[in-house]
Image (cartoon, helix red, strand yellow):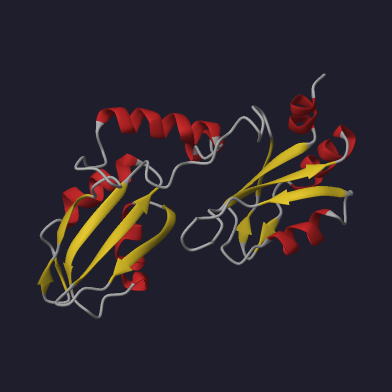
Amino acid sequence: MDAKQNDKEVSLYLGNLDPKVDETLLYELFVQFAPVKSIRLPKDKVLRRHQGYGFVEFFNVKDCEYVLNICSGLSLYDKVLRVKKLIGGQADAPEIDEDIGPVVYVGNLDKLVDSGSISSTFANFGTFRKPPQVVPGEKSNHAFIYYTDFESSDEAIKEMNGKIIMNRPIKMDYAYKKDSKEKHGDRTERLLYEKARENNFELEQLKKR
């Protein structure tokens, strides 16, 4: 059995993590049940915040199975921790490219609009894979919203384009891809993104079945 297969069998996927959760907290939690080999929280490259999921690796299968059974249903900061066996392997699952997926552009924003107000307004349409980013401009601000699925971004654009926020009609559309004249949201990107989400164990719909 190769090393990669061993890594899979002794690792767990952790989902639904609160933003306040960090590597130290997770280590202190799991080391109470079994020796921990490593903790990994994939982070957003810009804001350096984790994306709501992570991985914990133990030294043997027995410890991994024990922690899986004992920690199911455990809560951290009032959020129920989702614990799953790492099927497919952490090493097999590349992190999602930040420039792939539902990235929505919001333009003509009032100068007083910040990421907090954007989050509260657009969270109604779905969950974010990273916090919205507000970019200041001379006469107005604009923002980028990163949803976890295209259904949410499609609905947000449909419902909010042209709506008034702080006395300004906002402009919404899919953002342009990095260093490209093409916009996010085309059929090819949607298929690639869904595959990436499957590899990263982020399909919340499957977890709830």
Q: Quadrant of residue 21?
A: bottom right
Residue 100 vs 79, above or below: the answer is: above
Residue displayed at 30% across by 58% down: 144
Q: Quadrant of residue 66?
A: top right
Quadrant for the N terminus in the image: top right
Residue positioned most to the bottom: 112
Q: Nearer the viewer, residue 154 or 186?
A: 186
Residue 139 vs 163, above or below: the answer is: below
* Total numbered labels placed on residues in the image: 0
Residue positioned most to the top: 1
Residue displayed at 41% across by 52% down: 127
- Residue 180 vs residue 40: left or right? left
Residue displayed at 21% across by 73% down: 137
x and y, in percent, of residue 133 in the image: 35, 64
x and y, in percent, of residue 17 in the image: 60, 56
x and y, in percent, of residue 39 in the image: 73, 51
Residue 92 vs 81, above or below: the answer is: above
Q: Quadrant of residue 63?
A: top right
- Residue 198 vs residue 86: left or right? left
Q: Nearer the viewer, residue 62 or 96?
A: 96
- Residue 103 vs residue 98: left or right? left
x and y, in percent, of residue 40 in the image: 68, 50
Q: Nearer the viewer, residue 119 or 140?
A: 140
